[in-house]
């Protein structure tokens, strides 16, 4: 069963589904790339872990083990009765792991040089505290001779920073070619538009590959059984505007009336 939406599925952005969808989409995006790659390339998955701090609510008010106070304006004495520890005690640090994300890497053979990195943006990349960490790693990559492709299917969070405003759209696909920086090719489309077929750059002079993102989405949606898991009759996603919610309701109603076939229904401002 395909998604009732021809392009971006606004229900997929819910925290209950996104993490699973991200991993599933990345897997089938990699397979689509692998099917189109020339023999002198290979493709694999990279892994990124975000480090996080304790949530403010979980922090406790801690008093010092040793306090020094003045008595009668003369001597200083410890108030807690603690003794000094003059020999070090080895204690492991607590390092908290946050979201774990995968991305795609295209490697040139036989020198095994990284050529292209493909990212599917997540909420962790578009809001704090993960946004700062992602942008730092992104900037480090942009200083290398590596192509960077970033796919943003999320309405929420901050868009990627560019020197000029992004064109109007709901979905974005940014292609930053190593030999053309700081210029970046930006593809944009509205939510109701089918996901397009877009380029993935390889090492010059090899031509770009063309990957059908709609087919990747359909495969991920089907294999992840999201059609059984998402309640399309429930509340509309909060990030949709009023006219977009009306459009989404019409799409779902038309799909049900057609027995599951997606109808060509466009948003309107009524």
Image (spheres, rainbow, N blue to C red):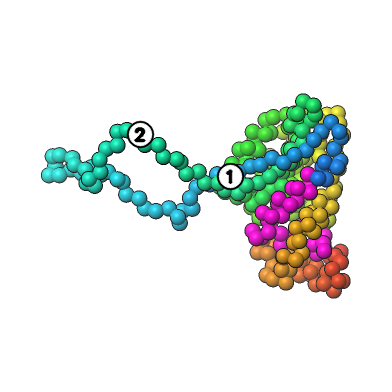
Q: Residue furthest top?
A: 111
**Res. 30 in view:** yes
- Which is more foreground, mark 1 or mark 2? 2
* Mark closer to the chain start, 1 or 2: 1
Residue 9 colored in magenta in the image = yes
At x 46%, y 41%, the residue is 93
Question: Closer to the camera, 242 or 80?
Answer: 80
Residue 47 colored in magenta in the image = no
Q: Quadrant of the C terminus?
A: bottom right
Q: Give the labeled residue for mark 1.
A: 50
At x 43%, y 53%, the residue is 59
At x 83%, y 29%, the residue is 204
Q: Give the labeled residue for mark 2.
A: 88
Q: Position of residue 137 (x, y in %)?
A: 63, 37
Q: Position of residue 162 (x, y in %)?
A: 68, 41
Callout count: 2
Query: SS at mark 2?
Result: loop
Q: Position of residue 191 (x, y in %)?
A: 77, 57
Main secondary structure type of the part rendered in magenta: helix
**Res. 164 in view:** no
Which stretch appears magenta? 1-30
Alpha carbons under labels 1 and 2: distance apart: 30 Å
Say few, some or many: other residues with alpha carbon within 10 Å of mark 2 (under 14 / 14 to 19 / 20 or more).
few
Relative side of 161 to 254, left or right? left
């Amino acid at each position: 069963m395909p998604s009732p939406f021809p392009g971006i599925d606004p229900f997929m952005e819910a925290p209950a589904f996104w993490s699973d969808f991200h991993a599933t989409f990345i897997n089938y995006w990699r397979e689509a790339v692998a099917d189109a790659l020339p023999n002198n390339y290979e493709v694999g998955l990279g892994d990124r872990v975000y480090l996080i701090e304790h949530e403010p609510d979980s922090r406790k008010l801690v008093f010092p083990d040793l306090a020094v106070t003045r008595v009668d304006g003369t001597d200083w004495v410890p108030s807690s009765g603690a003794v000094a520890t003059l020999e070090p005690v080895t204690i492991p640090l607590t390092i908290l792991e946050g979201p774990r994300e995968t991305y795609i890497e295209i490697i040139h053979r036989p020198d095994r040089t990284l050529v292209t990195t493909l990212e599917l943006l997540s909420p962790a990349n578009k809001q704090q505290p993960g946004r700062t960490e992602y942008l730092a790693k992104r900037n480090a990559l942009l200083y290398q001779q590596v192509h960077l492709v970033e796919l943003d299917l999320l309405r929420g969070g901050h868009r990627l920073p560019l020197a000029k405003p992004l064109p109007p759209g709901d979905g974005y696909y940014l292609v930053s070619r190593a030999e053309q920086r700081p210029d970046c090719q930006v593809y944009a489309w509205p939510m109701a538009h089918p996901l397009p077929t877009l380029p993935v750059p390889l090492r010059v002079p090899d031509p770009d590959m063309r990957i059908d993102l709609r087919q990747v989405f359909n495969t991920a949606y089907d294999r992840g059984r999201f059609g059984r898991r998402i309640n399309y009759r429930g509340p509309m996603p909060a990030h949709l505007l009023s006219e977009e919610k009306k459009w989404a309701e019409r799409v779902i109603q038309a799909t049900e009336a057609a027995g599951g076939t997606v109808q060509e229904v466009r948003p309107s401002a009524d």
